[in-house]
Amino acid sequence: MPKPLDDSITDVVAAKKLAAGFGDKTVWGSADFSIARGEFIGLLGSNGAGKTTLFRLILGLARPSHGTLKVFGSDAERGNSRIGYVPQRRIVDGESKIQSVEYVRLAIAGNRWGFSLASQVRRERQAALDVLATVDATSLAYRPLRELSGGELQRVFLAQALVGKPELLLLDEPLANLDIRRGTQLIRLIHTVAKSQNIAVLLIAHDINPLLPVVDRIIYIANGKVASGKPEQIVTSQQLSELYGAPIEVLHDSKGRIAVLGVEEAVHHDA
Amino acid sequence: MMLKYAATLSDTGFHWNLWADFQNMWQYAFMQHAFEAGTIVAIVAGVVGYFVVMRRLSFAAHALSHVGFAGAAGAVLIGVNPVFGLLVFTSGGGLAMAALGRRANTQDVQIGTVLAFMLGLGVLFINLYKGYATEAYSLLFGEILGISIGDVFITLVAGVLIIATVALLYRRLVFTSLDEDVAEAKGISVLGVGICFMLLIAVATSIAVQVVGVLLIFALMVTPAAIAGRLASRPAQGIAISVGIALAATWFGLFTSYYLPYPVSFFITTSVFILYLAVRLLQARSA
């Protein structure tokens, strides 16, 4: 893989006039943003706005329809070992008893040809246990995935994504199916791990509130447009109304929590 | 039908001296061939079946065997070894299903429609072939006691090919089976692995038809693997359990049907079904 000229000044991700779409249908366009090393970024927007599409572009699973996207200074390509990815998983096989540690092990040697010999299996399992320990999931290692709670599952998936010391984590709705308390705990864990290893995080979420204590910036996708900046710059009535092209109201309560009103009407209006 | 021979040839009955009973049975070449082919098929079905269950493709595998029926019947009609008709049709069907990609395990209506059409086509071919109804019977329910040394050889070649391919693809097969999205992001061609695997099912089905027939392929390809899936905590262990059960059921079926005047496939399907029930009941109790 081509190395960037200087690791310290190159952005992890840089998008210029970037557009995404399928065929001649554009999902969103003219996106200009960058992600620096170790930055924690929340990726927000309504359903179907194209948040996961941005992940697919960064992972090299889809090509930009316009503009340029640089990942670690070069064009996005599949199988980039500097990226850790947690997709939004819906199904965990209800009958399978496969242990969590085996799922983490997949990321260690799963993309090689052939099979692991007994000695390699032992080494791979040890490496998987080491990664699980970094997310406080040692006790989950030998439990079947299907027995884990939503929060425990996300910790195992996070461990899997951390294999190979990535410099960028792409997390697709890790907070889905978690209550507020568990969601906050998970965000804190992701933040701690990312800061300690200087990993940039791009995290898709529905609700900005659990992210507020940790995010450096947010990227907001709505109505085919992409905006990025500090939460207080982006999540305002004026900015969001502009993005959606419809009146949106942003309310703040005494504890700093944010409520965004009018999004559903705006999206329906658009569709 | 060879099944009838089995009953008449066994001049000495069952004596509860298992070794002597086994020797008695082993003196016949057709029983030796049945054990040889049965053993190869059980190993292949156990291995491939475990991935079939992990990838939730059991209905697709079942449908493939029905597609194979049309091919086998067509081969009989034009006077070719049915296994070649099976190979051509199941491979074609497998490629079509691989093209459906991850939708193959959700498009049950489409697959079922093709399955029924293929069975109908097979019935037509059998009807056009003015030979014996036993041809249709043995394709549908297996005819392991009629296996020639040539069939054993074909089975061995196909079996070695399948196991070698699985060994080569093993880690990628496991990754794409358990965690398709991440495997894709890690640079694995999910479609490529999917096509290879569908072809593996196609070949495995083609040789397994001799033992259990197209209608009962589930018993060797899915049930042992489903039991293994409920017991194994890692994939390698699951494959070992799956193969062990398929082997035990096949050997038990052959041995029993030599002494009892009932079909081999009945004993195979019944033993794996009872085992499946037992595991479910035990797990329900302990849960």
Image (spheres, rainbow, N blue to C red):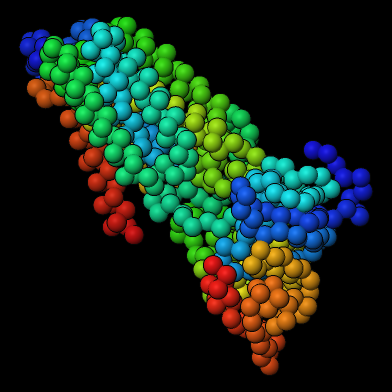
Q: Nearer the viewer, residue B283 or B88?
A: B88
Up-down: is B201 above or below B283? above
Up-down: is A201 above or below B176? below
Instruction: Tell me the quarter of the picture where residue A152 sits.
Output: bottom right
The quarter of the image holding the N terminus of chain B is top left
Expressed as whole percent of the image width and height from the top left, the position of residue A180 reads 57, 77
The quarter of the image holding the C terminus of chain B is bottom left
The answer to whether any part of residue A55 appears in the image is no
Q: At 33% from the left edge and 11% from the top edge, which residue is drawn?
A: B152
Instruction: Tell me the quarter of the picture where residue B211 sits.
Output: top left
- Taking B30 as reference, is B246 left or right? right
Q: At 29% from the left edge and 56% from the top edge, which residue is drawn?
A: B284
Up-down: is A105 above or below B262? below
Q: Nearer the viewer, residue B264 or A132?
A: B264
Q: At 20% from the left edge and 15% from the top edge, which residue is drawn?
A: B145
Expressed as whole percent of the image width and height from the top left, the position of residue B276 reads 27, 43
Expressed as whole percent of the image width and height from the top left, the position of residue A56 reads 65, 51
- Taking A252 as reference, is B68 left or right? left
Q: Nearer the viewer, residue A109 or B210?
A: B210
- Considering every residue shown, the one lying at the far bottom of the view is A254
The answer to whether any part of residue B110 appears in the image is yes
Expressed as whole percent of the image width and height from the top left, the position of residue B99 reads 47, 35
Q: Nearer the viewer, residue B232 or A208?
A: A208
Q: At 33% from the left edge and 39% from the top edge, which residue is drawn?
A: B111
